[in-house]
Image: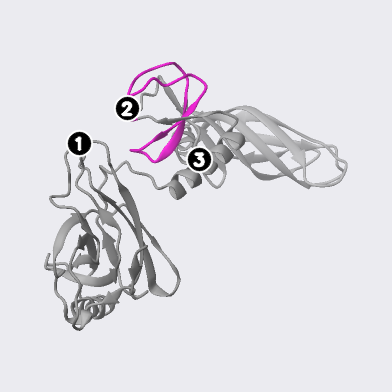
Amino acid sequence: MANYIGWEITNKGRELIARAVNNETKINVTKFKIGAGYNTGNDRELTDLIDKRNEFPINSYERKANGNVEFTFVVSNKTGSGASAIANSYKISEMGIYAQDDSGTEILYAYNKGTDGDYIPVYNGKNAIDIIEKCIIVIDQAATINVTIDNSLTYLTRESADRRYLEMQALSKIIGMEFGGNIQDVSNKTKGKFYYDNVTKFYYECIENTNLTYNDATKFRAISNKPISDRVEGLLEIGSNHIKFSNGIILGFGTCIASPAGRINNYGINMGGITSLILTVNGGTYIASGDTVSGTTFKARTNAPGDVSASYLAIGKWR
């Protein structure tokens, strides 16, 4: 069983943190390296691994409390093309996390070492190995970090896969549909299932069976709040005293004075003419009614003994 002593921030790493805290640069975490060496001196003074063998991209990261960041790396002895990623079998006795400043200068940010590390054999077509390394590294809370994630990685840890499954199960219950996957996946999409769009970052219902790998409005319908609200905003214009529809119809509303003889009021801000009018007395048991006089001028009547405040809804065409 691997016995690593723990991560040590190098002097170069500490200098990078100080510069980042002073807003002189960002901390751009780039890669993870493993090797077969073992430093016997001061780990802080290292600028590279003693005997580096392989390097791997970052699979994921998560900000923790107190300025800590947890990185996940997947160490594999097999390349994506099926060849061996390892030239000679070895035990991992040292590891390094690398970072760059904004100028692109790369440094060994943090170093870890240990005895009896994980054994990495040369891949022979049958002995594929994937080792998940989780590393918690101190990065000051005041520092801005960027992390280079290899988007070609499709590897999911068991932990993240289980979490994603539970999330999808819960979402399926809320939406009332079965999750079908990503729209961009090369697969058949089934009507009645919902899919995730990697481009818009929202969910969509499949409304017609398809094998498309892009979001077509004739095949997918938005079910996430943001696309729906964007579409509604395109249909409506809501103002302080009106609601305008895309077809030119406008609902105007406000308050007016109604009287037994009929008080003249005018709603002429943005309406070409009133085609229908509804009035109601504000409070009490009296009723109100109205007649269009001309254009946006209307007469408000009531059966109250005197003037009363009334609310009105006027329907017409946008001016």
Q: Of label 1 and label 2, which has the lower sequence position?
A: 1
Q: As shown in the figure, which amino acid type bears the numbered disc 3? A: Tyr
Region of the chain picked out in magenta, as a range: 184-212
Circle 3 or circle 2, nearest the eye = 3
Q: Residues within 10 Å of mark 1 (few under 14, many from 20)?
A: few
Residue 191 is covered by the magenta coloring: yes
Which marked residue is nearer to the observer: mark 3 or mark 1? 1
Give the structural element (helix, strand or loop) at label 1: loop
Tell me the element at label 2.
Answer: loop
Residue occupying the point 46% across, 35% down: 203
Question: Residue flagged by tag 2: what amino acid is it?
Answer: Tyr
Location of residue 67 (image quadrant): bottom left
Counting residues from the start of the chain, the first of labels 3 and 1 encountered is 1
Q: Residues within 10 Å of mark 3 (few under 14, many from 20)?
A: few
Report x, y in % for residue 19: 22, 78
Return the residue at label 2. Answer: 214
- Depth check, front residue: 24 or 138: 138
Q: Nearer the viewer, mark 1 or mark 2?
A: 1
Expressed as whole percent of the image width and height from the top left, the position of residue 147 reads 27, 59
Q: Which residue is mark 1?
A: 82
The N terminus sits in image quarter = bottom left
Identify which amino acid the numbered label 1 is placed on.
Gly
| Relative horizontal placement of residue 265, taking residue 167 as reference (left or right) | right
